[in-house]
Image (tube, coloured by chain):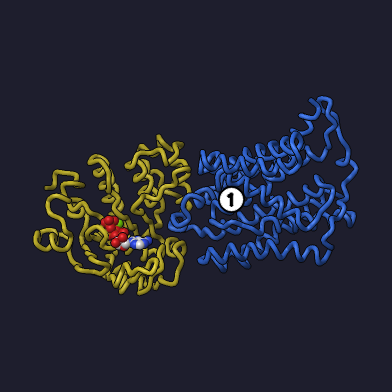
Chain colours: A yellow, B blue
Amino acid sequence: MSAPLLSVRELKVVVGGRHILHGVDLDVAPAGVTALLGRNGAGKTTTVRGILGLVPRSGSVRYDGHETVGMTTHQLVRRGIGYVPEDRGVFAALTVAENLRLAERDADPAYDLVHELFPELRQRARQAAGTLSGGQQQMVAIGRTLLNRSNRLIIADEPTKGLAPRVVTEVAVALERAAQAVPILLVEQNLALVRRLAGHCVVVADGRTAHAGPAAELLADAEKSRTLLGVGRRADAATGPGGDR
Amino acid sequence: MSTVVLLCITGLGLGALYFLVASGLSLIFGLMDVLNFAHGALLSVGAYATWWAASHSFGYPLALLFGTAVGTLASVALELGLIRPLYRRPREQVLATVGVGLAVPALLSAIWGADARTFPVPGALAGTFTLLGASVPVNRLVLIGAALVVLLALRLFLGRTRHGLVVRAGVEDRAMVTALGIDVRRAFTLVFAIGGAAAALAGGLAGLYFGSVDPTQGGSLLIFGFVVVVMGGLGSVSGAAVACVVVGLVQQFANYYSTAGLGDLSVVVMLAALLLVRPSGLTGRLA
Ligand SMILES: Nc1ncnc2c1ncn2[C@@H]1O[C@H](COP(=O)(O)OP(=O)(O)OP(=O)(O)O)[C@@H](O)[C@H]1O
Ligand SMILES: [Mg+2]
């Protein structure tokens, strides 16, 4: 693949004296979706948080050709990163409109796109985000990243977790649409979705990179995906949108 | 009846002082998780600066403005000089504010003496007026009016401005604010400026209320400020507004109808009772 937009080497994270990441390597291609996979507790979320500087980290995180390990989170994000955290990170006491407004960085935010993909957000603009359903909150979280056309990378941590199949589809459509313009680093347990969206994938296990390569190749290899991801049919069925099995 | 009216207005006046102290404390704690023990010192800085200016024939309004400005600057200096460098060391941060809270009164008594200094109250504010048969000091109304203006200004700031939006979001989840590309530390400096301004204003008004300034005023008002913050719900400005009225009134009435000093005790008992029933305070909400 051409020169990666984001290139992580030997990423190590220690939280509260505990070594959580021992050395994660990953590259995010300058286009399309790169999936970050791994079992529960493998260190996917910590990897993402480490990349963004939300936890103290060491190693190398090169973004757009620049080393960013010395930067603060807001400095890095201002270079064009949209982040959808695992817990969605919406501000419960703020309205939907306020949540979106807070995320505006561009002079001309793409509300047309956000409202086209998630019309509900327009109707619920004045509703406190804390009273939204999980799916609607996820729309706010994703909407925030789509608002800034200047974003050059989106990092989404399990955006379909715990969502009803219909909403999973809606989120998948939004991600697919976003991926046409911006590369995405996608943490996802829903392998049907990974199959549909991702070109490349990186697998972490026990805080280390255990595998990297084309997503289709890994998913086609039942034996390998079972050992690396610990998923049989069961995990797939638990979160899958159906239709792809 | 006239006693009740007087006690009410005086209680509200005192409550106004508590609110000015508590609103800043509450915002600072809500956003930064810093219990600012130096907040009383900021009040004292404001009180002495106002007193100094008023004694040098500034005229009270201008003196109050001067005192508030000095307190604001002191607060910003405190944030930039002490709080920010200790950002990742919360325990040291609190200790630093305790240190400032002790050092400033010591410094003030070293310069102007430990005794109370008479505050030059302007003639227009020294008098009383009659309300429902009670003869009420005019300055109580000034205090209440100032607190209402600050409450309104804070609500507009929090509800209508981008900086206010950042503060409200930061109270909920600081890390997520930075993950949206916002430098939340600027909001820290801002809430210290706002909190310092309100505390210093309280200092200048306390001089009016008590008729004198002394180095310990800030510390004793701070204690009730903390009570109001905890009762109102940490980080909630509206909660603080409600709590300060309750605390001011209960204190006045208890002090009058029982032995003096029981008012302060009843406030503490009330706080304990409230915390047992509602651990998150009256509202648990911001703005
Ligand atoms: N703040 C923390 N303190 C202590 N341990 C932590 C902390 N954060 C994460 N861990 C541990 O680090 C490991 C990796 O956690 P992480 O959240 O990165 O996993 P994950 O791959 O995202 O899992 P999941 O699929 O369940 O979301 C887990 O064992 C977790 O318990
Ligand atoms: Mg995770």
Residue type, mark 1 in image: Leu
Give me the residue at 21% from left, 47% from top. A239
On what subunit does the disc labeled 1 rest?
Answer: B
Give me the residue at 18% from left, 66% from top. A213
Report the number of discs. Answer: 1
On the rendered structure, is A68 left or right of B228?
Answer: left
Of the 4 image quadrants, the one containing the C terminus of chain B is top right
On the rendered structure, is B54 left or right of A49?
Answer: right
Which residue lies under the disc numbered 1?
Answer: B27
Residue A193 horizontal/vertical position (percent): 20, 51
Quadrant assignment, res B101: bottom right
Residue A143 horizontal/vertical position (percent): 37, 47
Residue B270 horizontal/vertical position (percent): 61, 40
Ligand 2, what quadrant? bottom left
The crowd level at tag 1 (other Cα within 10 Å; few <14, some 14-19, many 20+) is many
Residue B162 appears anywhere in the view: yes
Q: Does B205 sit above or below residue B32?
A: above
